[in-house]
Image (cartoon, rainbow, N blue to C red):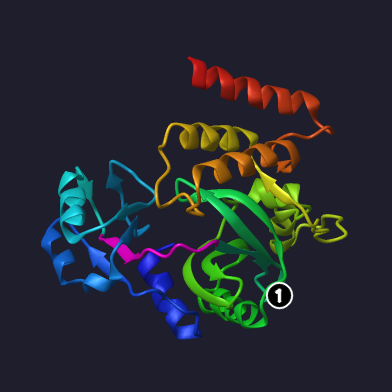
Amino acid sequence: LSKSRQVEAAEKVGLRNLPTYYLDMANPNGIQEIPAHHFPLCLRPSGEGKVVPFFKVECIQTAQDGIHFVEKLESLEKPLIAQPYKNLPNLVVHGARTENDDVFGLQGFLVDRKFEGLTLTIRALDLPEEISRRCLDFVRELEIVGNFHFEFLYEPATGEYFFMEVNARLGGTTAKVFSCGYDEPVLALQAFGAKVESDGPQVLRCTASSKLALVKYLHYTMTNRITPLDYPLEPKWKRIINTLWGLASYRDDIISFKDVKGTWAFYRQSLLGKLF
């Protein structure tokens, strides 16, 4: 979905947006017009066109850094979205909507740790009523049908939140929330009228992650390759302890004793791919 259209829809239904700017190759110096107090900035593709080389998110510290980054792109069909960087966890909201406007399965998850700008760990969270109501208004505004998930920056202590994007598909957190008991594939089928027997999401109070991602995160920590996109910013020793604890205690998004053969096949393929 178009990120710029999402920003407009979020504003219309009352979701809080970060200050948003658009950058393109035709005018890279336009970044100098952004107020200094909004730096550092996070740059993301708008979702409307291709960018080469592809990237998901880039954090830049100064306007000059942004100019250099845009000038190094080989092609950019649509402007990049630029928003102020905030050192906050993410709130992910999963749900589904039918063609008859029945919205169901709405569930919040807190992303306590991020790596390379993506979800590293996730756990269920009771969804604040205001966010729940605004999410319902949003999916109805864009007439989204099927499963979806929102991403927000979120401060649990204050309830402050900022809309980032919505994806009307299975996504990067699908496997992790599934391991927490949230069966999103079933909800997706039910949203389109499939008669699938289900007791509904049985969300567990646990933390889910990926063992492979945790090992890579630990390696990057040990080799001092952590960036501001790797939330939270904390001492190296604390990252190491938390990661080792996670390797021992977090639920994995792939490992399943109900499908030992499939689990082994996945990890064998992943390891062989990294070795060769």
Q: Report whether residue 172 is seen.
A: no
Residue at the spot x=43%, y=42% of the render?
A: 226
Task: Tell me the magenta residue range.
Answer: 79-89
Q: Give percent across and percent down for residue 210.
A: 63, 39
Residue 272 location, quadrant: top right
Residue at the spot x=43%, y=71% of the render?
A: 6
Q: Give percent across and percent down for residue 239.
A: 56, 44
Relative to the observer, which residue lies in front, 204 or 199? 204
Image vertical order of residue 61 relative to residue 219, above or below: below
- Report the residue that reaches farthest toward the top: 276
Q: Give percent across and percent down for residue 29.
A: 11, 62
Residue at the spot x=52%, y=20% of the render?
A: 273
Does the segment drawn in magenta span residue 85?
Answer: yes
Image vertical order of residue 139 relative to residue 257, above or below: below
Residue where numbered disc 1 is placed: 102
Q: Is residue 65 left or right of residue 161?
A: left
For the N terminus, the quadrant is bottom left
Q: Is residue 184 left or right of residue 54?
A: right
Does the segment drawn in magenta span residue 76?
Answer: no
Image vertical order of residue 129 relative to residue 162, above or below: below
Residue at the spot x=20%, y=45% of the render?
A: 73
Q: Secondary structure at mark 1?
A: loop
Q: Report whether residue 208 is seen.
A: yes
Image vertical order of residue 75 relative to residue 213, above or below: below
The kind of residue tagged 1 is Asp
Q: Is residue 152 left or right of residue 207?
A: left
Q: Give percent across and percent down for residue 225.
A: 40, 38
Q: Residues within 10 Å of mark 1 (few under 14, many from 20)?
A: few
Relative to the observer, which residue lies in front, 154 or 270? 154
Please state the total of marks drawn on the protein image.
Answer: 1
